[in-house]
Image: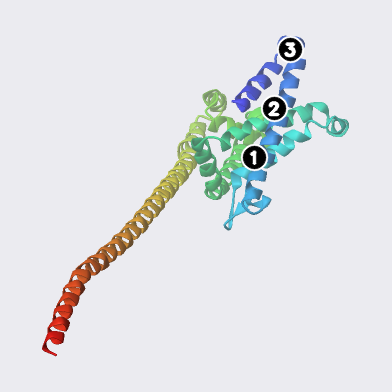
């Protein structure tokens, strides 16, 4: 909630009228929020130190806690903005921009946002490979467009740089037909150039990148589901072990009580037998005396 309120405060500070009336209060709220975030990170690190070491906040059991590192870095950069002395070197506006990094901690607070972020990061290698193919296609079409249409319309294809910008505009389908019709006034076959580029760049390569990201998102979700299932299975196994230990203790207790009851019955059965034996011995002793 505090992160969301900071985001709302950042939006309000962009309005000149609101900033003129409530700017000081909004900046004070932002400063206090940063102090809360610093205290929060300190408490979390202290709790990890109770478990063994403060560095467990960043890495434990051979695994890096990426979101904890992200929270620490963002909070540290936001805390730097509280130092007014640095404003001389980097500018007060740049320091205020650092405070906006705190809103990015929303990614570490919601699991769905974490899944999307992890999917994008994991899809970067595949996107880089697609980007290489993308750049090669752009280069071929930019050079071809410069050679074919530089004299027809230098504003769009005067050099390779302008051709790249024009092709990017065409790829985003932003007024691409206007560019095409201007070129077609001089070259009626120019539509082949534009149609082929749009089909390859806009409908094939962009969808390929989207497919890579979606596939990575599905992999992240499957991994999280497997981790959740494995954790639930581990919990069930621990519960079964606890139940088995309790059953074993109850069984040992029952066997002990059974042995004690058996010994008690043997003792009870042994006393009458001894008393009868002693009475017979007495009788035999008396009869012996009489015979003597």
Disc 3 + disc 1, Cβ < 8 Å: no
Q: Which label is found at residue 54? A: none
Q: Secondary structure at mark 3?
A: helix
Sequence-first tag of 2 and 1: 2
Q: Secondary structure at mark 2?
A: helix
The reply to whether residue 15 is in sight is: yes
Q: Is residue 57 above or below residue 179?
A: below
Q: Position of residue 240 (x, y in %)?
A: 35, 54
Q: Position of residue 250 (x, y in %)?
A: 32, 57
Taking the image as shown, residue 161 lies to the left or right of residue 273, namely right
Q: Residue at x 67, y 30 (%)?
A: 154
Q: Residue at x 53, y 24 (%)?
A: 181
For disc 3, the marked residue is: 22
Tell me how far mark 2 sits from mark 1, CA to CA.
Answer: 14 Å
For disc 1, the marked residue is: 71
Q: Position of residue 3 (x, y in %)?
A: 62, 27
Q: Position of residue 177 (x, y in %)?
A: 52, 25
Tell me how far mark 2 sits from mark 3, CA to CA.
Answer: 16 Å
Residue toward you, 251 or 147:
251
Sequence-first tag of 2 and 3: 3
Q: Residue at x 87, y 32 (%)?
A: 85
Task: Report which quarter residue 148 is drawn in.
Answer: top right
Q: Which label is found at residue 33? A: 2
Task: Report which quarter residue 151 is drawn in.
Answer: top right
């Amino acid at each position: 909630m505090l992160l969301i309120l900071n985001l709302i405060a950042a939006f309000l500070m962009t309005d000149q009228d609101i900033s003129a009336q409530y700017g000081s209060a909004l900046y004070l709220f932002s400063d206090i929020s940063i102090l809360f975030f610093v205290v929060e990170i300190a408490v979390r690190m202290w709790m990890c130190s109770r478990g063994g070491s403060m560095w467990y906040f960043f890495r434990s059991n051979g695994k890096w806690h990426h979101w904890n590192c992200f929270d620490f870095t963002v909070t540290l950069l936001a805390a730097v903005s509280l130092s007014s002395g640095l404003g001389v070197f980097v500018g007060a506006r740049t320091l205020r921009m650092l405070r906006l990094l705190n809103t990015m901690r929303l990614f570490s607070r919601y699991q769905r946002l974490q899944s999307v972020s992890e999917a994008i990061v994991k899809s970067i290698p595949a996107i880089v490979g697609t980007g290489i193919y993308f750049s090669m296609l752009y280069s071929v079409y930019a050079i071809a467009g410069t050679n074919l249409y530089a004299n027809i319309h230098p504003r769009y294809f005067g050099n390779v740089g302008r051709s790249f910008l024009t092709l990017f505009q065409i790829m985003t389908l932003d007024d691409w037909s206007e560019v095409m019709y201007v070129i077609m006034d001089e070259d009626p076959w120019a539509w082949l150039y534009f149609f082929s580029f749009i089909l390859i760049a806009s409908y094939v390569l962009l969808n390929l990148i989207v497919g890579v990201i979606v596939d990575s998102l599905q992999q992240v979700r499957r991994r999280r589901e497997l981790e959740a299932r494995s954790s639930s299975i581990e919990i069930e196994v621990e519960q079964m072990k606890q139940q088995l230990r309790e059953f074993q203790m109850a069984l040992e207790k029952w066997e002990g009580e059974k042995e004690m009851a058996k010994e008690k019955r043997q003792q009870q059965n042994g006393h009458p037998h001894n008393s009868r034996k002693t009475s017979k011995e007495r009788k035999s002793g008396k009869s012996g005396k009489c015979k003597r």
